[in-house]
Image: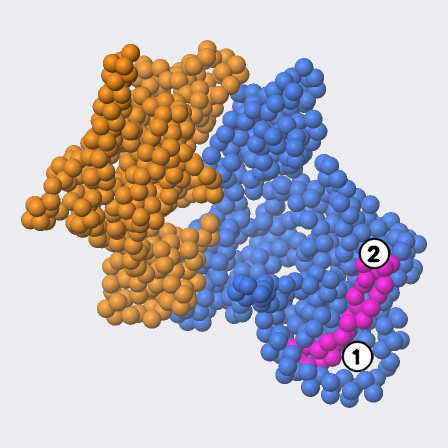
Chain colours: A orange, B blue
Amino acid sequence: MALRLLALVACVGEARAAMSRGFNRLLESVVSINVRELAFESGARRYTSSLGSGVLMSEDGVVLTNAHVVSRRAVEINVTLSNLERVGARLVGWDHWTDLAVLRLDMDEVKRRGFKLAAARFGESEKLFPGQEVYAVGTPHGLTRTVTRGIVSNPNRYFEDNRGINGYETGMFNTWLQTDAAINPGNSGGPLVTSDGRVVGISSRGYLGANNLGFAIPATTARVVLESLVRDGAVVRSYVGIVPGALQDLENFYALALNTGVLVSSVDPGSPAAKAGLRPGDILLSIDGARVDGRFPEQLPPIQNLVASRPIGSELRLAVKRGAETREFTVVTERLESRVGEEWALEKWGLSVRRVSRTYARENQLEGTDGAVVIGVQPGFPGDVAGVARGDILLKVNQQAVGSLEVLKQAHAAYEAAPAPTLLETQRNRRVSLLILKP
Amino acid sequence: MTSFRRLFRARFLVITFAAVAGSSAATTDLPALWAERVKSVVAVEYVTVTETERRPTVSMGTVVDAAGTIILQSVAIDPRAALRQLKDFRVYLPGEGAGAPAEYLGQDAFTGWHFVRAGQETRARLTPVTAFAGPGEPRRPAIAEAVWGIGLRPKDEDFQPYILRSSVALLQAIPQLTAIAQQEVAAPGLPVFDLQGALVGLAGPSGGQTFLQISRTGRPVPTLLINVEESSAFLVAAEVLPHLGRIPRDPSGRPLAWLGAYGLEPMDREVAKFLNLQSQSGAVVSEVLEGSPAEAAGLKPRDIVLALNGAPLPQLKPDRAVVAFLEREVERRAPGEKFTLTVLRGTERVEIAAALGEQPKLAREAERRYFDRLGVTAREPVYADAIERRQRPGVLAGVVAHFVKAGSPAATAGLRPDDWVREIDGAEVKDFADATARLALIEADAERAEFVLLVARGNETAVLRVKLK
């Protein structure tokens, strides 16, 4: 009896030891990140700084964090290691769709200063169960190496946000881990771990105004995105323009067997699916023979990924039920693009602009993809004086079509060199105006 | 325009007092003028019958002829209301609590006025405002001249008339010559007189005045206040008297002239200078509508209209007024009338000979049907619906959800007003008749537990499931 008890204690002791070993190593791999970013919104070039967390995923300095912590606008990135020393880093790639970004530490500096890096390891997020204990590690509000504890509230939460990452789309290609471990601003990009220190998620966001509703990108997604970003600097996805919707309890109405098909909730105008003849209200049954099941929202990301993972320009055979008949459509995929285009500030005019993207043009039913959207106006500058407002689209400058930001940059450079009245053609809603930028 | 008013008020106050004191001694007494002229104003009440309620509206009107014709401001009636929704027109004399029935004659597109005719027994007690216009040229008020008008208290005070007095502070063509007084001078829609009692104008809607709202904690917030009961702006008599005879032939207001140049935007002086047009006034055409007279005449998007029938467009301030000028030039004409537009296209001048057409069916004229159990009014789609949604007007299928009753099955399913219903129960909606026939079947079927709509909203579509049980 006594012996048995002792064995049990020994066992528990061993587990605790394992936990602390793994957990300690994890703590050494968590970093905080200071970023200085360019911001164009005000009609001028401005710098903003922000703070987040990250986790070292390899001994050669690869740091995984959130896309909303470090974006492509970052001009200076500093990473504070667990030994409290600061090291410079650069952006390897980012993916706003899954809210992930990858940095690489300045390894010359790391070597020169003799730092040893500890890498964290992924755990198996697909095996998490509701109620399982998890820990969030990070730098909430700048408080370094803060550990908070909670449970997995839901391992498979679906939500998408059309403008979630500083105006970029997110959430269509992954589900999220929901936890009640406290996640505060600054936790972003830090790991969500199990008690053995394995990374099962990357903490991303909390519900504002709610208590203990935190969300993390699961390791299954993070693993794949990390690999792509390290290898290619980007995640390339295919797109056909179908917005899927969960069937919920509409099977009866569409005379479908349970767990069959997904509703085509919307078809982007001008997209490959629209050109092929797909219509909202169609039921998509299979993609290249692989049956799809979109009964619940949580099941939509895998269907999206079925399309997204195909090479660009692939021919997809889509089996579709429309009314009583089933038809097949062939759709050629395009590259998935964000609605947010390249940005720039035309500082002498006091205007910041964003290129009209294919997605933006389709969403707003524009005639073509020429033009740049005004995203910021500096009061008192020529743009403001002429009457340009946020949301206007600059179509032409000195009667030349704005086919790229380059056209605007050149006209702006000419204005800078020799200020002279410059003619703008702008569009607001559907009204076209001519305006003069005056020195 | 009224932001100038404070400025003017201080400056003119002294002058006005002097003018009033000087002239009133020499002229007839105002109480006598008042007693006569009060007979030229009335309050008009009507009811808008909607799917779920009867909404009464009161507005002020001016009597314009011996036949008891009364004009109301364009804002008096909601332009979306269908003719058959407007019921129970009644005319109330100032100071009287009981009204008498009246007839709605329709709206004139050019002036925007609604015309109403008082019943036989009321007519004898009215004096047309033209009786005070005098012979010869209409009286044009001068800056600083003293003017007065009539206001009416609300219905529960029997529309008691009261006097408003002020002085002209500013005269401005926007594009109609409009006088702006220092203070409120009449209820919108009622006449304005000089101290001799001659008609000098008709009060329009009041311009707003910006005030700063200052709370104890926050920053001052600019707030626009609009006085809806009294106005300080009036059209001068010369802009009113020649048009009093524009009584619509038909309550629908038809015929309505149509050009189809969409989104006219003013060209300012800087742009004119840049395009070597010196001080020429102009308006940019944003779009040319499909199937319109403008399209048939060869007008193109981005054309800049410079002249009408050979006469250059007038220089007006604010710049926007030139757009109103062009729109009025269309509205004053009848379908079939021809005119020429001179436009700048790129660098060349092009003459466009256009013949005006008849306006396509308007939303207020479209067929509608309300389904009470479902909680939705289906409306026939019209030309403007297609244009708004960037669809081709010729190939218009589906119906528009014109009204969705709060808390109804349709509302619970997420249907919203202006949604475009494309399919009902998985089958495409061919036209209005098809849609209403099918909705009527669903509504009549007491066994029906649900039905499904495919609706388009903006650029998105959604499948809505409407539960009836």
Camera-nearest label, 1 or 2:
2
- In-image side of A257 versus B88 (left or right): left
Q: CA distance from mark 1 to mark 2?
A: 29 Å
Front-lying residue, A359 or A340? A340
Residue A320, picture quadrant? top left
Residue B80, picture quadrant? top right
Does residue B145 belong to the magenta stretch? yes
Q: Name the residue at 70% across, 29% down.
A: B372
Provide the residue designation for mark 2: B155
Front-lying residue, B316 or B459? B459
Residue at mark 2: chain: B
Does residue A130 belong to the magenta stretch? no
Disc 1 marks a residue whose amino acid type is Leu
Q: Name the residue at 53% across, 30% down.
A: B455
- In-image side of B145 versus B175 (left or right): right
Between discs 1 and 2, the one toward the N terminus? 2
Front-lying residue, A161 or B75? A161
Front-lying residue, B169 or A27? A27
Q: How many marks?
A: 2
Whether residue A155 is visible, yes or no, is: no
Disc 2 marks a residue whose amino acid type is Lys
Question: Is residue B50 positioned above or below A257 on the image?
Answer: below
Place of residue B205 in the rendered image (x, y in percent of width and height, measured from the top left):
68, 62
Provide the residue designation for mark 1: B195
Q: Considering the image in quadrants, where does the C terminus of chain A appear?
A: bottom left
- In-image side of B307 versus A267 (left or right): right
Mark 1 in CB contact with mark 2 (< 8 angstroms): no
Query: For the magenta stretch, what is the residue range?
Result: B143-169
